[in-house]
Amino acid sequence: MNIEWMHGQHAYYIFTAYALTLAIVVYCALMPVLRRRALMQNLRLQQRSKTVAARRHD
Amino acid sequence: MTENPSIWQRCKVWFHRWGSPAWFYRTSGYIIPWLWGLCFILALPGLYLGLFVAPADYLQGDSYRIIYIHVPSAWMSMMIFALMAAFGLIGMVWRIRIAETMAICSAPIGAAFTLIALLTGSLWGKPTWGTYWQWDARMTSELVLLFLYIGVMALYQSIDEPRKAARSASLLALVGLVNLPIIHYSVQWWNTLHQGSTIKLDIGESSMDTSMLIPLLLVVAASKFYYAAVLLSRSRGLLLQQDQHKRWPQELWHANKADPT
């Protein structure tokens, strides 16, 4: 396993490039999932309020 | 209609089903975990081989290891733009809503890949060229691509009616296609600081050793599956947001199939 580069003069640039990429990639992957979950939660609340309103009407 | 439909007819029915938001939402939910699995299966060994097994470059030293994210991102930035324009064209000609949705959802992913290509490129440029940025043809045209992505997203957000907004943004994407050959051939048309193509898919041999090339190709393949997974995920979210007051999300929710993943 070649890990010499981690102590080399270019390590800073390599680490920064990979860290920035990881941050962007994770953000792009997580955002739609979190957004959809929030929408599903909203839908669930809407359904619940409709059910409660229907029960009151009865 | 015949009793036993041919394979062609079955394929046609299967393809047309993708036009239904409810079917798209449910089916893509089953596909996404597989896409993530393939992405990780390819990316992890690719990055391991690239970072810990491949030898240092005789000229660039270890800074070349940035190419394992820079090259796939740069390729993806152009491929996604072409796909975005293709989805937009399908949406404009055949009025298929899912195609419009996928065109719009491609824009932020393509912008992210373009940003990664620009950032990692400048981080590679500093130890190699001695500068983070140069108004070189390749870099400038890639920056224009980022602005085009931002323009597509801004145009979509600026129009209230989603379908009209998607068609307008698709038109901009189609116009922006002209930038892709400029990016690709910039290193041939002008004397640029940026190096020419190392990997040749059409004619000639790649000027890269196999021990360095295989990890790169693995990460390139992984980036395609990443794009597919995030695109489907974003499209599901956008469809759910636009259709939340329609019947299908509520029916799916009632059937407890809204989130099969």
Image (cartoon, coloured by chain):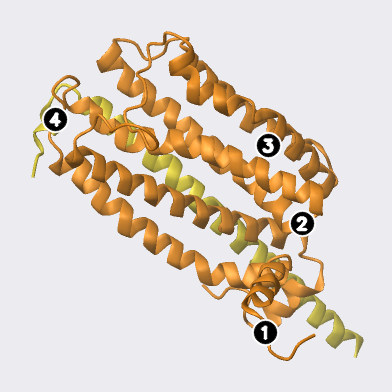
**In this view of the protein, which residue sits in the foreground, A31 or B163?**
B163
Closer to the N terminus: mark 2 or mark 1? 2
**Chain coloured orange in the rendered structure:** B
Cα gap from disc 2 to disc 1, whole angstroms: 24 Å
Residue highlighted by disc 3: B153
Give the residue drawn at x 73%, y 50%.
B90
Give the residue type that dot 2 points to.
Arg
**In this view of the protein, which residue sits in the foreground, B71 or A25?**
B71
Residue B112, disc? none
The residue marked by circle 2 belongs to what chain? B
Give the residue type that dot 1 points to.
Ala
Q: Which residue lies furthest to the right in this view?
A: A57
**Chain coloured yellow in the rendered structure:** A
Residue highlighted by disc 2: B97
User: Which dot, 2 or 3, sits closer to the camera?
Assistant: 2
Specify the quadrant of the image occupied by residue B159: top right
* Residue A15 % position (x, y): 26, 33
Residue B255, disc? 1
